Image (cartoon, rainbow, N blue to C red):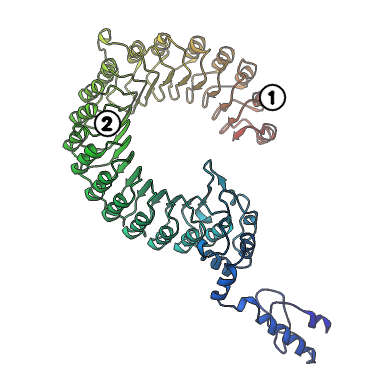
Amino acid sequence: MPTLVNYSGDGDFSTGSSFCSRKDGYHPSRKRHRISASLVVKSSIFEAKKNSIEILPDECLFEILRRLPGRERSATACVSKRWLMLLSSIRSSEFYGSKAPRGKVDPISNNQVSNNTELSSEDQDLEVECDGYLTRSVDGRKATDVRLAAIAVCTASRGGLGKLSIRGSNSLRSVSNVGLSAIAHGCPSLRVLSLWNVPSIGDEGLFEIARECHSLKKLDLCQCPSISNKGVLAIAENCPDLTSLTIESCSNVGNESLQAVGKYCIKLRSISIKDCPFVGDRGVASILSLASAVLTKVKLQTLNITDFSAAVIGHYGKAITNLVLSGLQNMSQKGFWVMGNAQGLHSLSSLTISSCRGMTDLSLEALGRGCPKLKQICFHKCCFVSDNGLVAFAKGANSLESLQLDECNRITQTGILNALSNCNSKLKSLSLNKCMAVKDLSPESSMLSPCEYLRSLSIRSCPEFGSTSLAIIGKLCPQLHHLDLSGLCGITDSGLLPLLESFQTGLAKVNLSGCLNLTDEIVFALAKLHGGTLESLNLDGCRNLSDASLMALAVNCPLLRDIDVSKCSITDSGIVALSYGVQTKLQILSLSGCSMISNKSMPSLKKLGRTLVGLNLQHCNSISNSTIQFLTENLWKCNILS
C-alpha cells in the first residue's frame, strides 16, 4: 500500500486498474484491488498532476517561456516538441532581457531536444567564419522543421545564425515554412540564406525572413517552385542590404520581383538568374539599369531575353567586372555586336559565353574592341566562331591574359597559332578542349612571332592534334611552366621530345594522362630536362610506362609533390625505387589500377607515408585488405582510398 500511495507515474488513476510506467498507457490488472482510504490520497495526487504546467494553454506558456534567460530557455526546449515549437515561434524582440553577443555556440545545443530530434556532435558543428557569424548546413534527411526549430532556439541566446544552407528535404517530414519561420524568429542577424531543392518552402517562409532578418545580404534560391514574385518582392522591400541574389529553376519567379530588387536593393553587387521561364527583358533590364553603379557580377543562363537585354548590358554595365552569358538562344549577332560597340563595359575583366548562337566572328571582334580591360575569356560551344573572329579578337583585346576554347569546332590550328602570334596582349594561359577542327597542318611557322608571356598551355581531347603541331607550339611558347596534353592519343615520344627541349624555363606541372603511345623514353627526357623544377606529374592511363619511369623520377625530381601513375605497368620494384628516391616533399601518390603492385610494397608505402597526405590504392587487386588496414592505422596523416 505505501508503494501505491507514493507512486508518481504518468498514468491517470482509475478504480479497478493497475498502473504501468510504459508510455503507451495502462493495462487492466489480473487481480481485483481492494478499495481503501488511500485512494483518496492517491486521487488528490493525480488531481495535482492534472493541474501541472502541461495543461496551460499556449498563450500562458508563451508568457512564461519568453521571460526565461537564454540558457534556461534552451534547456526548456528539451522538454517536448510542443515547448520547442512554441519557443521557436517567439521572435527575438519578444524575449525579455538583452541580446547576447554573436559568434558563440550555446553548450546546451548538443543536448537532446526531443525523442525524435537528437542532435549529434557531427550535426551540431557550427563553423565560425572569419566575420564571426555562425554557419549551418542542413542536408537531405536532416532537413526537418523540428531540426530547424532546434537550431534557432539553441543559437538564439548567442545572436542566432549568420549563415544557413538547406539542401534537399526529408521525404517523410519535409522542411516547410514553419521551420524557416523558426529561423527567422530566432536568428534576426541572418546574413546568408541558401535554399536548394526545397519544394515545401514558399512565400510565407520568405515573408518571415523579410520581416525579421533585415540584415540579409545574400539570398540563394534553387529549385523552389513554391516561391513566387511575392516572396522575392518581400525580401527586396525589407532587406535593403542585399548584395547577392541567385535564382535558379524557380518557375514562379518573374519580372515583377526583379524590378523590385532593382528598385529597392541599391547595394546589389551580384546577380545570377538561370532557367526561370517568366524572366525576360523587362526584369533583367530593370536590375541592370537601376543597379548599374554597384553591380559587378552578372550571370544570365537559359533565359528568354533578347537583343534588348544585350544592349542594356553594353550601355549600363560600367561597373560589371564578371559577365557570364549562357544558353541565350534569342540573342542574335546584332545584340552581341551592340553590346560590344556600346562602349559601356569599361571595367569588364572576365567574360564567359556558352551555347549562344549569336556569338559570331563579327560580334567577337566588337567585344574585343569594346572591352579594353578584358583579361579572361571563355567560349563554350560557340559554333559560329571561326579563325577570323579569333584572330580579330586577339588583336583588339590588349589586356587579355587567359583564353579558353571549349568545343568550338570551327577554330583550327591555323587560327590558334595566328592568334598567339598576333596577340598584342600579355597572354599567359591558353586552353583548348574538344576542338575537333584542331588538327596537324603545315603552316609557315617561320612567319609567326613567339608568345613570350605564355606560361600555361592546355590542349585536351583534341583527337586530330598531333606531333607536328607540338613542334610549332614549342617555338611559339618558350616560357611555359604548366603543360596539359591529356587525352591526345596521337602524340608520340618523337613528337613530344622537341617540345620539351624547346622550353627555356623548367616545367612545374605536366599532365600527360590518356596519352597511350608514350613510353619510358619520354619520362627519361622529362626527368632529365625539367626534373629540377617539376612539382606535379600526371601519367594516368599511359599503359606503356613501367618501373623505369618511376626510377627516373626518383633520381631526378626532388620537388615532386604529386605523382599519378594510375593504370600504368608499375610493379613493387618501382615503388621501392620511389621510396629510396630524392623526393622529400611528396604529398599525393595515385596508384589506382596498378594490378601488379602487391603486399610486398607495404614497407615502401609506409616509408613514403611519412610525408603523404593522399594515397590512392583503388583497384589494386593484389594488395590485401589486411595491408590496407595496416597502412590506414600507421599512416594516420594520410587519406587512403581503397
Kindly report the distance in space between the C-alpha atoms of the residues bearing marks 2 and 1: 60 Å
* Position above or below: 496 against 278: above
* Position above or below: 410 against 453: below
- Kind of residue at badge 1: Pro
Callout 1 crowding tier (Cα within 10 Å): few <14, some 14–19, many ≥20:
some
* Position above or below: 615 against 290: above
Residue 298: name its quadrant. Answer: top left
Instruction: Tell me, yes or no, whether the two marked residues, 2 and 1, touch with CB atoms within 8 Å.
Output: no
- Kind of residue at badge 2: His
Residue at far right of view: 2
Of residues 410 and 268, which is closer to you in this image?
268
At numbered mark 1, what does the secondary structure look like: helix, strand or loop?
helix
Residue 64: name its quadrant. Answer: bottom right
At numbered mark 2, what does the secondary structure look like: helix, strand or loop?
loop
Callout 2 crowding tier (Cα within 10 Å): few <14, some 14–19, many ≥20:
some
In which quadrant is the N terminus drawn?
Answer: bottom right
Can you tell which of label 2 and label 1 is closer to the viewer?
2
Which is nearer the N-term, disc 2 or disc 1?
Answer: 2
Instruction: Tell me the number on the disc at residue 603.
Output: 1
Residue 175 placement (x, y as % from top left)? 47, 60
In which quadrant is the C terminus drawn?
Answer: top right
Residue 483 placement (x, y as % from top left)? 42, 20
For image coordinates 72% across by 86% down, the residue present is 44
Of residues 358 and 575, which is closer to you in this image?
358
| Viewer can see residue 497 | yes
State the residue position of label 2.
346
Residue 97 placement (x, y as % from top left)? 58, 62
For image coordinates 54% across by 22% down, the residue present is 569
| Viewer can see residue 27 | no
Residue 321 placement (x, y as % from top left)? 33, 34
